[in-house]
Amino acid sequence: MNLVGVLSNPRSTRNQSGLDRVRDVVEDFDGVFHFEIDSISDISLALRRFAEQGVDVIAINGGDGTIQAVFSCLLRERPFTVMPPIAVLPAGKTNMIAEDLGAMSAKPHVYLRRLLELCRDERLATRIVRRSILRIEGIPGAPDLNGMFVGTAGIVRGIEFCRQIIYPLGLPNLLSHPLTVGLLFFGSMFGGLFGRSPLATEPIAAKFGTVEHEPQQYFVITATTLDRLILGLRPFGDTGQGSIKLLAVPQRTSTITKAFLRTFNGTLGRKPIKDVTTIRTDEVRLKLNCPITVDGELFDVPPDTEIRISGNEALHFVNFASV
């Protein structure tokens, strides 16, 4: 059986009440090295320990912020001679990365058991997939980061709204995410008609691939290597070459409405919308005057901060979709 290194963040949403079930699964199998971190700063130590022990598979039992920190540490410090595949367990609140890799229910112990059964039965190799990873450079006070989703403009306000207003209601993600998207859409639409939208940010200068865009307000800019976002949405186009799937929607009511409707009927990116960018590329540059999110973690940036996003890194993952 492969040696599996399980990295658990006890503070992640699902682990606050469910970590004992993960521990029980660990006790049921041989060949498991379980490392529970006290803080994000412990991730580097955990990965070094995994490398020293010869771990063959890494299981990340944490939220999207923990996952992003593991990616960044793996690719920045490179503790492994041969990078092991990664299993992402759905232990956070949003679990966008875990769901994209087939872990659809928020039960990390269930997917850990499936992973360990795959290893025990020597079936893991059939579940490995390669995914591109973003590199984000230029955030002041932070080293280069790696992740699978970057967003700015109105989406940052949306994340803050969801965390401060919607999540405290205690609704499941199946309800809280559609409610957030709907409220933000109508807030932006009516705000744009009758005044300043609550999602409006200062103008952003952008370079998408080789095309430069003059500074303007955006409703949303996302760059991702995921195949699907929350609610299973795929607001991506097929134009261009590259691993980054880019969506940029200007802050104009009519444009937002068209993009919103086409996102939910699955045609965004297939039919062009004036001024909406849905391309694939290997580089995005943004001169920001608003915060940015990397896999759900928010970063404040000073005015006119230039951020570079590239997609030339890759890692291997366990795909639970067909398990």
Image (spheres, grey):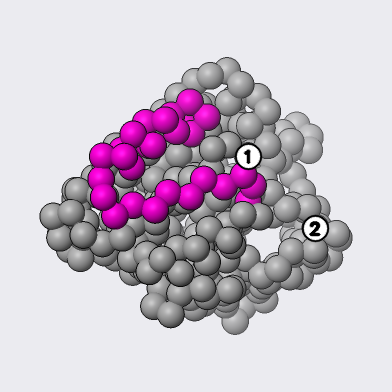
Residue type (three-letter) at the residue carrying disc 2: Val
State the mark number for residue 159: 1
Provide the residue designation for mark 2. 301
Q: Answer with left or right where residue 159 lies relative to residue 64.
A: right
* Image point (20%, 65%), residue name: 125
Graded by Cα atoms within 10 Å as few (under 14), some (14 to 19) or many (20 or more), the crowding at tag 2 reads some
Graded by Cα atoms within 10 Å as few (under 14), some (14 to 19) or many (20 or more), the crowding at tag 1 reads some
* Image point (64%, 47%), residue name: 39
- Residue 1 appears in the rendering: yes
Looking at marks 1 and 2 on the same chain, the residue that comes earlier in the sequence is marked by: 1
As helix, strand or loop, the secondary structure at mark 1 comes to: helix
State the mark number for residue 223: none
Residue 71, above or below 104: below
Residue range highlighted in magenta: 14-40
- Residue 251 appears in the rendering: no
Task: Report x, y in % for residue 312.
Answer: 49, 78
Residue type (three-letter) at the residue carrying disc 1: Ile
